[in-house]
Image: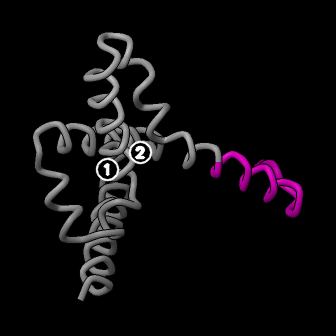
């Protein structure tokens, strides 16, 4: 049942974002920022963790989950390091994911020849 919940919740999030992209004039970058900020706000309010416990990877993999991860890191860093934790907590909690994205995107750029749009 965990796989089914992850599948339908992740699919629902993707479908809602696709509808948002097609029905509004928002640029994809702005939609990504809205998703990350929404995940952080939902995490701060305490709604996102029970949602993630229910949906598993369906809720933790999309950009909403990344925003929640940043919030968790900032919260923990503030508790241990004080004010400076605001600036370092998000990087500490998401360093592995960001590093993997950079490494794999670099490797993809070596394998595939990028083309400029005209």
In the rendered image, residue 83, in percent from the top left (x then y), is placed at: 31, 10
Instruction: Report which quarter residue 53 is drawn in.
Output: bottom left
Q: Nearer the viewer, residue 38 or 56?
A: 56
Q: Secondary structure at mark 1?
A: loop
Observer-nearest of 107 and 114:
107
Q: Is residue 116 above or below residue 89?
A: below
The way the protein has been coloured in the rendering is one colour
Residue corresponding to mark 1: 24
**Residue 43, image x and y in percent?**
20, 43
In the image, the segment drawn in magenta is: 100-118
Quadrant location of residue 68?
Answer: top left
Q: Residue at horizontal 29%, vertical 21%?
A: 78
Q: Residue at x 14, y 59 (%)?
A: 50
From the image, state whether disc 1 or disc 2 is nearer to you.
2
Q: Secondary structure at mark 2?
A: helix
Seen in the picture, residue 87 relative to 109 is either above or below; the reply is above
> Measuring 40% from the left and 28% from the top, which residue is drawn there?
89
* 1 or 2: tag closer to the N-terminus: 1
Q: Quadrant of residue 33?
A: top left
Residue 43 is left or right of residue 22, and the answer is left
Residue displayed at 32% across by 84% down = 3
| Extreme-front residue of the structure | 80
Q: Position of residue 55 (x, y in %)?
A: 24, 71
Relative horizontal placement of residue 17, taking residue 97 as reference (left or right)? left
Q: How many marks?
A: 2
How far, Cα to Cα, is label 1 from label 2? 14 Å
Above or below — where is 111 with respect to 2? above
Report which residue position mark 2 lands on.
32
* Residue 18, magenta (yes or no): no
């Amino acid at each position: 049942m965990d796989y089914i919940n992850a599948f339908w919740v992740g699919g629902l999030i993707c479908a809602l974002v696709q509808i948002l992209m097609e029905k509004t004039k928002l640029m994809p970058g702005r939609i990504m920022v809205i998703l990350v900020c929404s995940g952080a706000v939902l995490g701060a309010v305490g709604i996102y963790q029970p949602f993630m416990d229910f949906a598993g990877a369906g809720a933790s993999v999309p950009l909403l989950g990344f925003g929640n991860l940043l919030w968790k890191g900032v919260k923990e860093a503030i508790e241990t390091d004080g004010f400076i934790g605001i600036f370092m907590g998000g990087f500490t909690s998401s360093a592995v994911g960001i590093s993997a994205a950079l490494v794999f995107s670099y490797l993809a750029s070596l394998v595939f020849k990028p083309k400029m749009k005209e």
